[in-house]
Image (cartoon, helix red, strand yellow):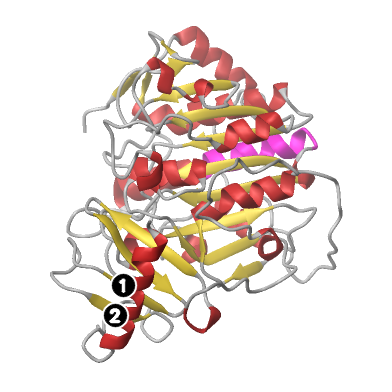
């Protein structure tokens, strides 16, 4: 396998590794200590607005983590996040592709509204407000390390959208950018998770009082380049090895938070940007769901998501309520005491669900359930409304389909012919929602 190289200078890489957690010893490959027992006495503590860390994996499937049931890939550090926090089983992204999903995450709005309905070359619309800008106005230091994917020109860079600091790549390939200028740096693709984590740790160390750190990984996106110490360890080929490498980087990040006394009041969100490449296209697992990346079937838009905040989230929670990555923007605004920008949000505030004050938030959908819209290259693709999911024709199907996800989460039994009334109702509602 030919190793892909990314550009970074040896001096910058050395500095990043020195500030990495563990005293510059590099990424840990060992399992973490025993997770907090979920039966232990616990009560919430109000320590004020939390620090925020979002760790975004690239093309990681719902079924690719051991805490979500993978039989061979071992992810003890991410599993520990779940044991000490809340694991979401029905967490959606708005679209099954990288750039558009990231646009929705950072704006709280449908990707088509903000100028990035699919992958670049595209950029955010003028005047769009990214989460970092809102949190910076609240007094947070805002940093990003990793894959941006929301524009290519200098004026598109994260530091022009509210981030105080950016070090990373524009997409899955190419030179490193620092701030809004290219560098001459070179680093192997097998070292990206380590490098991005080192940058994150360095930023957090310098801004301990109040910070928002967005770590947007390139792994486990194809092609798969595990570092030597991870190669052959997963029992699931290079893909599984890369996921275990990503897991180790999460362990290093969490160790840094612990060592600096920051973990109690830091909300860590771990999630994927979309579903995986599944056979025959790739080796990823969507668990029990149909489809994968590029598809608006469940496997393409339902992703693993975990939130850990020891001060406010009871350990070991499993949240089955449908939620969306678009909900993170208004939720984090609420939790930090920031102010929403004056524009419609397509996500909703789920802060009380996150903290366990409620187990259901509901919505205007069928039987009072959530309404979650999905989009693809051809625009609006479908709608989940309560237990029902309606999909327009696309690469996943030549015709309209309708599924009862509570009875049929694998989307095996199309009910569209049996329930034309629901098809008409959901199509009409979808048109209202995407205006």
Q: Which mark is residue 208?
A: none
Observer-nearest residue: 37 or 214?
Answer: 214
Give the residue drawn at x 36%, y 67%: 430
Q: Main secondary structure of the magenta part?
A: helix
Q: Is residue 54 left or right of residue 210?
A: left
Q: Is residue 386 left or right of residue 98?
A: right
Give the residue drawn at x 42%, y 31%: 148
Magenta-drawn segment? 247-261
Quarter of the figure with residue 6: top left
- Give how far across and how far down residue 179 sits, in percent: 50, 15
Taking the magenta stretch, the answer to whether it contains residue 252 is: yes
CA gap, disc 1 and disc 2: 6 Å
Q: Which residue is label 1 attached to?
A: 427
The quarter of the picture where the N terminus appears is top left
Give the structural element (helix, strand or loop) at label 1.
helix
Q: Is residue 300 above or below residue 4?
A: below
Q: Is residue 405 above or below residue 206?
A: below
The reply to whether dot 1 and dot 2 touch (C-beta < 8 Å) is yes
How many other residues sit within 10 Å of disc 2, few (<14), some (14-19) or many (≥20)?
many
Q: Which residue is label 2 attached to?
A: 423
- Give how far across and how far down residue 97 sits, in percent: 32, 48
Q: Residue furthest left?
A: 398
How many other residues sit within 10 Å of disc 1, few (<14), some (14-19) or many (≥20)?
some
Taking the magenta stretch, the answer to whether it contains residue 43 is: no
Observer-nearest residue: 328 or 316?
Answer: 328
The quarter of the picture where the C terminus appears is bottom left
């Amino acid at each position: 396998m030919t190793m892909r190289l990314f550009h970074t200078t040896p001096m910058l890489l050395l500095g990043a590794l020195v500030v990495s957690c563990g005293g510059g010893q590099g990424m840990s490959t060992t399992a973490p200590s025993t997770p907090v027992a979920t039966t232990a006495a616990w009560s919430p503590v109000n320590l004020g607005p939390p620090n925020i860390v979002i760790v975004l994996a690239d093309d990681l499937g719902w079924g690719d983590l051991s805490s979500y049931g993978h039989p061979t890939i071992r992810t003890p550090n991410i599993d520990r996040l779940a044991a000490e926090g809340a694991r979401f089983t029905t967490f959606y992204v708005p679209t099954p592709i990288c750039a558009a999903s990231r646009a929705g995450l950072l704006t709280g709005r449908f990707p088509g509204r903000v100028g990035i309905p699919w992958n670049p070359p595209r950029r955010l619309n003028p005047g769009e407000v990214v989460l970092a800008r809102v949190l910076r106005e609240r007094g947070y230091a805002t940093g990003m390390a990793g894959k941006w994917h929301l524009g290519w020109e200098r004026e598109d860079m994260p530091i022009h959208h509210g981030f105080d600091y950016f070090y990373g790549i524009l997409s899955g390939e190419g030179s490193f950018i620092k701030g809004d200028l290219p560098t001459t740096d070179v680093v192997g693709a097998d070292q990206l998770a380590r490098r991005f984590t080192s940058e994150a740790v360095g930023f957090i160390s310098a801004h301990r009082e109040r910070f928002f750190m967005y770590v947007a990984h390139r792994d486990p996106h194809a092609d798969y380049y595990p570092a030597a110490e991870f190669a052959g360890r997963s029992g699931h080929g290079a893909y599984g090895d890369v996921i275990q490498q990503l897991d180790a980087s999460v362990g290093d990040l969490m160790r840094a938070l612990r060592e600096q006394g920051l973990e109690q009041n830091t909300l860590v969100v771990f999630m994927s940007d979309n579903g995986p490449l599944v056979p025959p296209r790739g080796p990823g697992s969507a668990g029990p769901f149909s489809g994968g990346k590029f598809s608006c079937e469940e496997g393409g838009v339902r992703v693993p998501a975990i939130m850990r905040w020891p001060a406010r989230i009871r350990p070991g929670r499993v949240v089955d309520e449908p939620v969306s990555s678009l909900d993170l923007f208004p939720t984090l605004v609420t939790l930090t005491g920031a102010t929403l920008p004056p524009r419609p949000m397509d996500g909703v505030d789920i802060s009380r669900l996150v903290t366990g004050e409620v187990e259901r938030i509901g919505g205007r959908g069928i039987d009072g359930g959530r309404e979650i819209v999905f989009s693809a290259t051809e625009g609006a693709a479908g709608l989940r409304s309560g237990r029902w999911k309606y999909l327009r024709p696309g690469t996943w199907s030549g015709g309209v389909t309708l599924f009862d996800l509570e009875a049929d989460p694998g989307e095996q039994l199309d009910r569209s012919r049996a329930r034309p009334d629901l098809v008409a109702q959901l199509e009409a509602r979808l048109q209202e929602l995407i205006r």
